[in-house]
Amino acid sequence: MTAVAALAVAAPPALAAPECTSGRATATAVGAPTAHVTWRARLIARTPLAPAPGAGSEDTIGPRDASWLLVLRARRDGAGRCRLEVRLPSRPNDAAGWVDADRVELEPTPWRLTVSRRERTLTVHRDGHRVRRFRVVVGAPDTPTPTGLFAVLGVWRTDPGAFLGAYVLPLTAHSRVLQEFGDGDGRVGVHGRGGASLRDPLGTAASHGCGAAQQPGDRLAGAERRRHTARRRSGPSALSYRCAAAV
């Protein structure tokens, strides 16, 4: 089985008003993710969430919940407004809701990460083409890495000598076995290796569900962290890890 994640390291500039399509996404049309392009929605403020296009709001979501949301599909409602189905950062792992496209900033990315549970590898794709592949530690049989379509919530810098290595990329995914883990809610992510985690050889199934990569993975996250720093200084950037998937 494989896990796939989209990675935005050199995405095209954000588009002010992309076409709204009910089919597959393109570089100029927001829609369902493909191997070549995925769209993400940046939350500017708390935004109403609806269970269906044009339906009444049942909840809200804001930047503190997730900076960006993975767009699953797009559709126009009866009034002609573009509505987006987005992946939510909460349980269950396939949680989704609909937001008004006018309430978010949209941006395409050609980057994707694929984690194979069978091969125990993480592959970086750009525009559908493989760029790099790394061996990783995946979930142990009792705590398997979950499958599904996820989003990367951010990039956290940690102690390089600690268990999680230099960087952590938390996902919208949660363990289907562990409802709680440590101080968290069983959230799954991609992280580096350090300390005691170095005892688990790359290419094995030994984690609590996360994907653990050696230093090449840390360098990828480190490059992304620098992009985040640049964005805070000079405004929004089109380059960042922001969507993920697992199948």
Image (cartoon, rainbow, N blue to C red):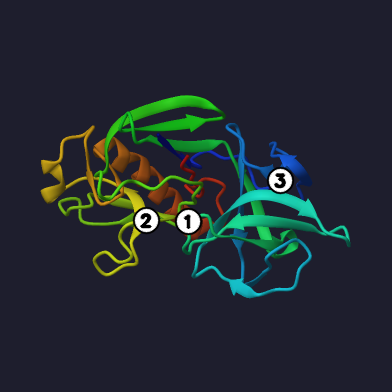
Q: Nearer the viewer, mark 3 or mark 2?
A: 2
**Residue 239 percent across, percent down from the top left:** 52, 45
Can residue 16 be spotted in the picture? no
Looking at the image, which is closer to me, 65 or 219?
65
Distance from Cα at disc 3 to Cα at disc 2: 30 Å
Q: Earlier in the sequence, mark 1 or mark 2?
A: 1
Q: Amino acid at mark 2?
A: Arg
Q: Amino acid at mark 1?
A: Asn
Q: Is residue 135 shown above or below 80?
A: above
Can residue 192 be spotted in the picture? yes
Please name the residue that numbered disc 3 is placed on. 30
Please name the residue that numbered disc 1 is placed on. 93
| Helix, strand or loop status at disc 1 | loop
**Residue 135 percent across, percent down from the top left:** 28, 31
Q: Earlier in the sequence, mark 1 or mark 3?
A: 3
Q: Is residue 207 shown above or below 77?
A: above
Q: Is residue 210 left or right of residue 79?
A: left
Q: Quadrant of the N terminus?
A: top left
Looking at the image, which is closer to me, 103 or 151?
151
| Helix, strand or loop status at disc 3 | strand
Label 3 crowding class (10 Å Cα cut-off): few <14, some 14-19, many 20+? Answer: many
The answer to which image quadrant residue 3 occupies is top left
Q: Are marks 1 and 2 in contact (CB under 8 Å)?
A: yes
The answer to which image quadrant residue 50 occupies is bottom right
Q: Are marks 3 and 2 in contact (CB under 8 Å)?
A: no
Looking at the image, which is closer to me, 146 or 239?
146
